[in-house]
Each structure stands twice: as structure tokens, then as C-alpha cells.
Amino acid sequence: MTDHALAVVRAGALTTVQDLGRPGHAHLGVPRSGALDPPAARLVNRLVGNPPEAAVLETTLDGCAVRPRRTVTVAVGGAPCPVTVGGRPAPWGAPVRVPAGVLLDVGSAVSGVRCYVAFDGGVTVEPVLGSRSTDLLSGLGPPPLATGAVLPLGRPGLVHARVDVVPQPAPPRELVLRVTLGPRADWFTSAALDILTTRAYTVSSASNRIGLRTEGPALERAFEGELPSEGMVLGAVQVPPDGRPVVFLADHPTTGGYPVVAVVRESDLAAAAQARPGTPVRFVTAGRRQPRRVP
């Protein structure tokens, strides 16, 4: 039994291992996956002296609790939450020393959705196609954490950052997503495109790592018909038959048959990862072009 490991005492609603993902495999039908909030994952890694690509834990809403088998330096970031070490309050957003055998408890998010937990040396589960990320859609990577599981840790490398406070963006009270219309904006009426970029939506409770679903006015198609399945990209705004836009996130499928009305700027997607159900959503046109009309 290695000392370079941690035991899962409380898995939480959905806690997964994530790094920066496995881009470049869409031609094989493999999604990018990776942390939904990459800036938060990079920051906690920096705080413990890891390279940006080291694997961390991504929790969902109610956190998790783990017991390391060696003394570790830990940092918790992303959604603000209470942190305790051995039952005593510990800082959020700063490196913390956790002795071997002592319980680290990451509590429920006070705001936002996803917390990121970095350990010096990183979580070193076996990589798949160059990444240690859990992909909920394809099933690649390690399974979501389960109580009693043991995860391997790497050996510490760099000296962790010496900071008192690290500024992190607050979870959004209103999610503003800048979009470029297309490639299938021509499948929708002019009124529908105006609705998309002028009316308010809210985040649906059905959202997950695959996509941020919205509730609000339905987008009317310009004509009836079916699309052949075509390639999908991160941030694609797909419109299923109910007319409510879905923003594709890290675990999105690589192909799909519903029309994509717009694409969200990748830099706006970290905020989407932290938007709770009920959060107002606005789609703002970042660059308008003339839609291509179907003959």
C-alpha cells in the first residue's frame, strides 16, 4: 500500500478527476472533457506548486471529504465553500498543509457550482489518450469518485505559492454569453434570432457537464427538416426540438443533428460552469454575419 494516495471518505453528489482535457481527438469521436472552469483548476494547481495540467478534483455543489495517506499541500478554489482540516476551519483559495491521516472536508458551495481541489503532486490516475479527465459522456477516464475509493497522488515537485489572498472571479449573478451567429442561423426565423439575443433565459436544473440547458422562449425554425449529423465544437448553442438553446460544455458530443444557431466564446464558458439553476442568461451578439440561406 503506497503512502502517495488519498482515500475518499465522502464522495459528494458528483466529484470527478479533471485536468485540462484531451483535445484533438474529435475525429475519433472523443470529446475534449477536462475541467469546466479551467482558470480555477489552473489557479489551485499553481497554489500548490503543480504544473497547470496536473489533475485535480472537481466537485459539484456539495463538495467532498478525503483523507490523505501522506502530508499534502492542498488548495481549494472555484466556487466559494467552507474548508476544514481535522474539523478546524481552513482557508479557501490559499495553500493549506494537511497532515497524513487527517480529514480534509470541502463543504457545500456557498455560491457557484463547482469547487476545484488540488494536491501537491497531482492526482495520478492512469491517463487515457493523454488525459486523466473523467468524461461522463464517453465513459473515458476514471469513474466519478465513490466513498471508499483510493486515488494515487504524485510526488510533490515545485514549492507552493506564498500568498495571503488570491483574487478569483465570483460566480455569476447574471450569465452573459457572447455569441457569433451560425453556422445554422439560417434554420431559424429572423424573429427567433432577435429573441435569442434580446430576451432573457435562465439556467435549467437539467444542466450538467455535457451542456448548459436553458429555460425561456422557444426559438422558431424557418422551415421543417432534418440535418445530417455534423461536427460540434465547445460552446456550440444547439437547439433541440423544444426550441430551448443548449450550450455545449466540456463533455459534449462530437457530432449532432440538431441545428447550431450560434457559438459562445470559449472565454465565457468558465462562468457558465459556475452558474446555478435559475441564474439569468443573456446571449449577446459578438459578431454578426449574414446567415446562409438554404436553397
Image (spheres, rainbow, N blue to C red):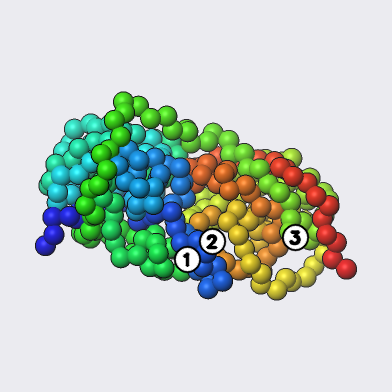
Residue visible at 39% across and 47% down? 52
Mark 3 is surrounded, within 10 Å at the Cα level, by few (under 14), some (14 to 19) or many (20 or more) other residues, namely some
Q: Secondary structure at mark 3?
A: loop
Circle on res. 184: 3
Q: Secondary structure at mark 2?
A: loop
> Viewed as shown, does residue 223 lie left or right of 46?
right
Amino acid carrying mark 2 in the image: His
The residue carrying mark 2 is: 252
The residue carrying mark 1 is: 137
Mark 1 → mark 3, Cα distance in angstroms: 24 Å
**Where in the figure is residue 102, as x and y percent of width and height?**
14, 43
**Residue 65 showing in the rendered view:** no
**Where in the figure is residue 22, as x and y percent of width and height?**
46, 61
Q: Is residue 41 above or below residue 240?
A: above
**Where in the figure is residue 207, as x and y percent of width and height?**
52, 53
Mark 2 → mark 1, Cα distance in angstroms: 7 Å
Which of the two discs, 1 and 3, labels the residue nearer the N terminus?
Answer: 1
